[in-house]
Image (spheres, grey):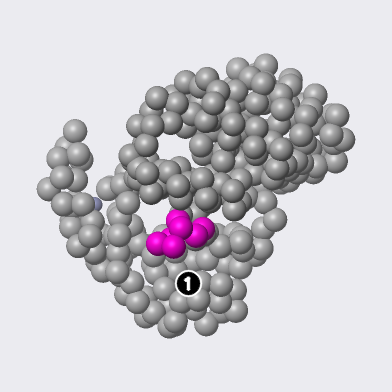
Amino acid sequence: MTVMHQIKKWYYSFQNRWNEERMQQIINLIQNLSEQDVLTLARESFQLEDDMLVSEIFEIIAFTHPNIPRLHQELIDVKCFYPHVMFRNASTETREQLIDLLLNGELDSTQTHHLMCTLAWIGDKRVIKLYHDWWQQAPIQIQGDTLTREDLSWKLKLAGWQLNTNGERQNLVWEEHYKAISAPSAEVVSEEKCSCCNEPLIILFDFDLSLPSAEFLQFPGERLRIATCFQCGFDEVFTIVDGFGNVKWSDVNQNPETNKILLSR
Ligand SMILES: [Zn+2]
């Protein structure tokens, strides 16, 4: 696969359900709805039995109508904090309401997880400070759940950022969006093998670093290839890369024997 450069306005994950043209039609349709109609759509969507479809509709609403306080309030009233991105652009008042609910309300474990992820998506200074305080106190108890630093990090990573050593927000994603296009002529099988299963690593992305569209990577060199193992892809696969397209298995990966055991199950 090679990455072509075509900036996309929307982030979405629905390609399996609708093709791109249909998807764009649906986005346009929702985008042109009034706030009142979006509220009606959201309320009626809740009645659907297809949870995935409900999430997808709400994700579109999150981008087309990022801050409808009334909708946020109705979601809070039923303690629904999923999809997490729904509250991304919440008002200060809504954010404070969410924090108060987390710290003083009554939530079950799933609601607590989703609410913490929702706050991570808001990710402003207030939330950064909150997470940093938790991080320093970890393991901490929130709503009866014990949370380690790893638990906190995972919730932040779901929202695309982490805390650096100074307790500041460090984004793990770029603002630019590009469409990835499969290039039939591109080589996809790396010469490097996975140390767990001995299968060749598969090239996921192949960047020509000389292209202006690759500047956002701020990666020196001519070529960057990102590879992973499709057999062992259930866990993070770390590789050592350079600016010449080389990919090497990293020793920081889990003990291969551990992965072999997991693979044999
Ligand atoms: Zn493998």
Residue 186 as seen in the image, left or right of residue 43? left
Residue type at mark 1?
Answer: Phe
Q: Residue furthest left?
A: 257
Q: What residue is rendered at 44% in x and 81% in y?
A: 220
Q: Quadrant of the C terminus?
A: top left
Question: In the depicted view, which residue is nearer to us: 36 or 256?
Answer: 36
Q: Give percent across and percent down for residue 10.
A: 67, 51
Q: What residue is rendered at 58% in x and 35% in y?
A: 99
Which region shows up in magenta? Answer: 163-169
Which residue is identified by label 1?
207
Q: Give percent across and percent down for residue 188.
A: 38, 63
Taking 45 as reference, is 259 above or below it?
A: below
For residue 142, what is the image quadrant? top left
Q: Is residue 164 magenta?
A: yes
Taking 251 as reference, is 39 above or below it?
A: above
Q: Is residue 145 magenta?
A: no
Q: Give percent across and percent down for residue 237.
A: 30, 55
